[in-house]
Image: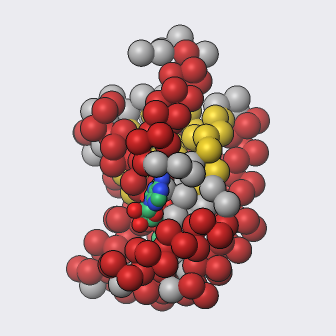
Amino acid sequence: MRVVLLGAPGSGKGTQAALLSETWSVPHISTGDLLRAAVQAESALGLKAKVSMDKGELVSDELMLGLIEERLGQSDTTHGFLLDGYPRNLGQAESLADLLQRLSKSVEVAVQLDVDNEEIVQRLANRADQEGRVDDAEEVVRNRLRVYEEQTAPVVDFYVEQGVLSRVLASGSIEEVNQRIQHAVKIQAGEFGQAG
Ligand code: B4P
């Protein structure tokens, strides 16, 4: 099971990936979490990434490719993975396809989580209150949404062309969204003859 979760910031990728990784027993790979760990460790990569993250911009493709290449090279990904937050632009989508092709693999299902922007701003305002993330401040969230529209939305078409995209309505309770994703993935994976 090799699944990519797509969606705007705050659409619930991280929330859902954590649940699905338990259900499917595959690792949850969040580039946001990897970057936040690097920032906290004050590594060279973390210091560079923090400048972009605090403004709601994307971290450079070059840094991201190194990070994802290293993570997908680890042995726990042999039987699958759930990617959350990568790819975030067309260049990353193409790099991921090349990387997986070298390993004789591909993305089997890409799930697009759809939520409207005002609900996202509200969710992230709640998280800003609870967790104090700099990039959840309202003006940074609005910039992240702009970056998403300009750079990440085209990735959806990339996976439509590959014939692996499923769209899921991501408002409603966390459990409802989770059930919708599981259903969508079962149908999509079924087309690969791998349902269940
Ligand atoms: P991410 O960590 O990916 O942050 P995100 O988009 O906000 O998270 P997500 O969509 O997972 O939302 P979540 O489940 O947490 O990225 C942060 C930054 O890192 C980026 O801006 C960028 O700078 C950098 N970055 C990451 N990947 C990169 C890449 N590939 N290339 C370049 N740069 C990269 O949910 C949000 C909130 O909503 C939570 O508080 C949650 O509790 C709540 N929620 C979730 N589902 C809900 C529901 N159904 N109902 C109500 N609330 C819900």
Point out the residue furthest to the front here.
172
Residue 77 can be seen, yes or no? no
Residue 127 in which image quadrant: bottom left
Point out the residue furthest to the top here.
193
How far across and down, in percent of the image, does residue 89 sit? 65, 60
How far across and down, in percent of the image, does residue 93 sit? 62, 50
Front residue of 101 and 38 = 38
- Residue at point 61%, 16% (across, down): 191
Image vertical order of residue 156 relative to residue 53, above or below = above
- Residue at point 56%, 29% (across, down): 184
Left or right: residue 55 versus residue 90 is left
How far across and down, in percent of the image, does residue 3 sit? 48, 37
Q: In the rendered image, which quarter contains the N terminus?
A: top left
Q: In the rendered image, which quarter contains the C terminus?
A: top left
- Residue at point 67%, 67% (across, down): 117
- Residue at point 67%, 60% (across, down): 116
Left or right: residue 130 versus residue 104 is left
Residue 8 can be seen, yes or no? yes
How far across and down, in percent of the image, does residue 4 sit? 51, 43
Left or right: residue 65 versus residue 38 is right
Front residue of 160 and 73 = 160
- Count all numbered tags in the image, as a single digit: 0
Left or right: residue 108 versus residue 35 is right
Colouring scheme, one of rainbow, by chain, secondary structure, one colour: secondary structure
Front residue of 189 and 76 = 189
Image vertical order of residue 8 relative to residue 24, above or below = below
